[in-house]
Image (cartoon, helix red, strand yellow):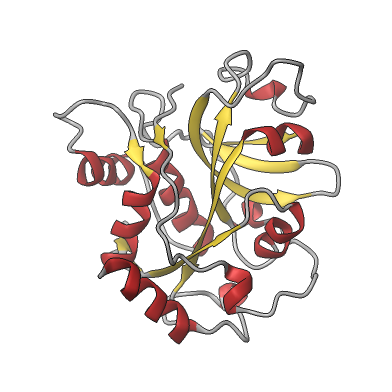
Amino acid sequence: MRFGAIHSAHPAGLPRLSARAGLTPVPIPNWLARFPADGDPLGNDDFGNCVDAADCQIIRLMGGRADRAMALARYQMNTGCPPGPDNGSDTVVDMRNWCAAPIVDLSGQPWPIYWASADHTDVSEIGLALARFPLLITIGLPAAIADAPERWGDPPQSGWTPDEAHRVVLGFEDGRRWWVRSWGLDFAVDPDLLRLMLLTVDVPIPHPSAAPPELRLDGLDYAALSADLAAIAA
């Protein structure tokens, strides 16, 4: 399997979800159950399109349809590959592009989003965000386990560092471990390992016009989010 996330710092002015909505603790739903893992890596077995494949997995969890061709078309749009170099997608460029032009799924339905963040060092804030939306996260996989996702559920070992940037969907937390979707499969991640690996947390918020009821957040200031994103784009 391949990786391919190019980790960039969030642009100045990107809002935290907690600044635009009053987040009180509620149970975290298993977002991954909304589209059970089917083992389809969406091209990430042959290309470094993990960022674009993760977008397509989010579309599926929102209720849309996506496949390998769609993920690779988005990779080409973001990077020029193919035919350009297979160097991966910049996560900030990808999120900017999604905000500027909604992803259109296989049914022809557009999925416009707003973009917010959560503090990647604050487990409580991540949990509050995850209780409202499935999240896109960038992790730095230690070289020793980068190709061994069955070991992501084990605690980190001394000397491990976040070596290989990879984009996955964070979709559940069961009280003991976090659960992510990568390469079309769901993997448990040890909480201490996730703290070591976590580089960024992005919150793609579906526009209320497209979102199913469970992905509409009462009290979220969508107008302020729109203004935030317009300022970032200026």
Q: Residue at x 59, y 58 (%)?
A: 134
**Outermost residue toward the left in this view:** 83
Relative vertical location of residue 111 with respect to residue 50 in this rendering, above or below: below
Left or right, 140 with respect to 152, comes to left
Left or right, 154 with respect to 101, comes to right
Q: Nearer the viewer, residue 80 or 31?
A: 80
Residue 181 rendering spot, x and y as whole percentages: 58, 41
Q: Quadrant of the C terminus?
A: bottom left
Residue 217 rendering spot, x and y as whole percentages: 60, 79
Q: Quadrant of residue 159?
A: top right
Left or right, 87 with respect to 212, comes to left
Residue 40 rendering spot, x and y as whole percentages: 47, 35
From where the camera sits, is residue 139 visible?
yes
Q: Residue at x 42, y 82 (%)?
A: 209
Q: Nearer the viewer, residue 140 or 121?
A: 121
Relative vertical location of residue 192 with respect to residue 46 in this rendering, above or below: below
Q: Quadrant of residue 102?
A: bottom left
From where the camera sits, is residue 188 visible?
no
Relative vertical location of residue 132 with respect to residue 91 in this rendering, above or below: below
Residue 197 rendering spot, x and y as whole percentages: 63, 33
**Outermost residue toward the right in this view:** 175
Q: Residue at x 39, y 79 (%)?
A: 226
The count of marks equals 0
